[in-house]
Amino acid sequence: MEHVLSLPVLRLAVAAALGLFIGFEREHAEKAAGVRTFALLSLSAAVFVVVDRPLLLAVGGLLVVVLGALLGARALVGERDGLALTTTTSMLVAYGVGALAGAGELVAAVAVGVVTSLLLVSKRELHGLADQLSREEVRAAGQFAIIGFVVYPLLPAGERSVSVAGATVAVEPRVVWAMVVTVAGIGIVNYAAVRLYGGKGVAVTGFLGGLASSTAVVGSAVEHVREDASATPYAVAAVLLGNAAMSLRNLGIALVFTLGAAVPPLTDVVVPLGVLALACVGAAAIVAGRGGELDVSLDRPFTLRYVLSFGLLFLLVVVVGSLAQSLFGTAGFYVTAAIAGLVSSLAGAATAAMLFVL
């Protein structure tokens, strides 16, 4: 399979096909550059890469930019509406897609080509969504992009050791920050669900959020109630459903972590955790049913102060738990599990399963 993907003919064919794919929308939109132009742009870039002519590739890219500038100037003088910025950018992307395909990065080339085509054909939907977004929503989206896609990759991977009270404590910065991203993500999902389904959206996302972090669900529910007290029944239901999901998730962790070990699987937790999950689901149905149909209005998906405060608290618990483990050995595992459970029962369940196996 790897040998087939390395064939120059296949790379050139994929480049031309992706150029055609991107160009179809531009042709349908009656733009100056259509199917043939885009196919040739992608194919030319692939040819320059396959024959290993980086100078030609650079000159070709420069010509694409110049051609785009000419299209923009043509639109500016009134022959076409708008500044043709989308077409110009699409041509440059198509050229890049051809270069990727020529270099053998076929998966990346296909991914970029498909996403580009989707963005082009979704013009009306994307513009409609942009028109509906408030300033707070745009700001929240920008903040989430920063904490999720900018800050996270910059953090060091793996454990980092620090000295606390004369003991060495291991901390994973990315794990701590992942909790911050999780809290913000749950807030955005809850916000979108409320926009679509009203107050019931809070309860709907409670279960899904609980699979990631029941503590985050509680924090998000509290934020919603602060903004609109009428959301209280559904916020309570969300917390209950989050606990139900947490119980089922921890049950799965306990069983999976102990399967194949020298000791029998930890089946003793099936009944208590199963009963707890069913009880929470039943209670959530009763509580949500009392709320009636509510029109819940939220001002913003999440607050940056809240998610950062939550991340700081989680970091504190991780440090304290790691410190207890370092000072007290095996007994420290129990302390760590108990402390970790205050913020994330996921860590507590994993620690308990590990203790059982040991």
Image: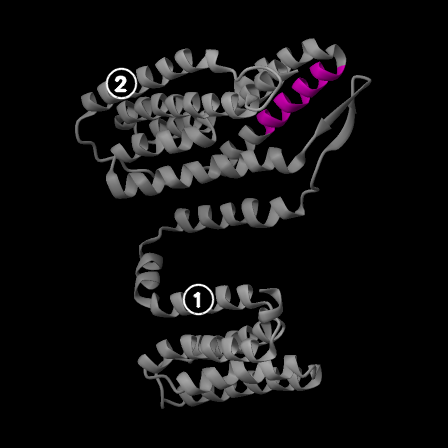
**80 left or right of 10 in image:** left
- Residue picked out by circle 2: 282
Residue drawn 31% across and 15% down?
279
Mark number, residue 66: none
Q: Which quadrant of the structure image shows residue 295?
A: top left
Q: Nearer the viewer, residue 256 or 162?
A: 256
- Quadrant of the drawing holding the N terminus: bottom right
Q: Amino acid at mark 1?
A: Val
Residue 221: where, in percent of width, then height?
38, 27
- Residue picked out by circle 1: 114
Magenta residues (range): 312-326
**23 left or right of 314 in image:** left
Is residue 56 in sight in this rendering? yes
Q: Nearer the viewer, residue 272 or 136?
A: 272
Q: Amino acid at mark 2?
A: Gly
Please rate how many residues cluster around mark 1, counting C-alpha atoms within 10 Å: few if below 14, some from 14 to 19, many from 20.
some
Residue drawn 58% across and 81% down?
45
Is residue 76 in sight in this rendering? no
| Sooner in the amino-acid sequence: mark 1 or mark 2 | 1
Q: Is residue 98 above or below residue 267?
A: below
Residue 112: where, in percent of width, then height?
50, 66
Residue 128: where, in percent of width, then height?
30, 60
- Quadrant of the drawing holding the C terminus: top right
Q: Which quadrant of the structure image shows residue 81?
A: bottom left
Magenta segment includes 319:
yes
Residue farthest to the left, as pictured: 292
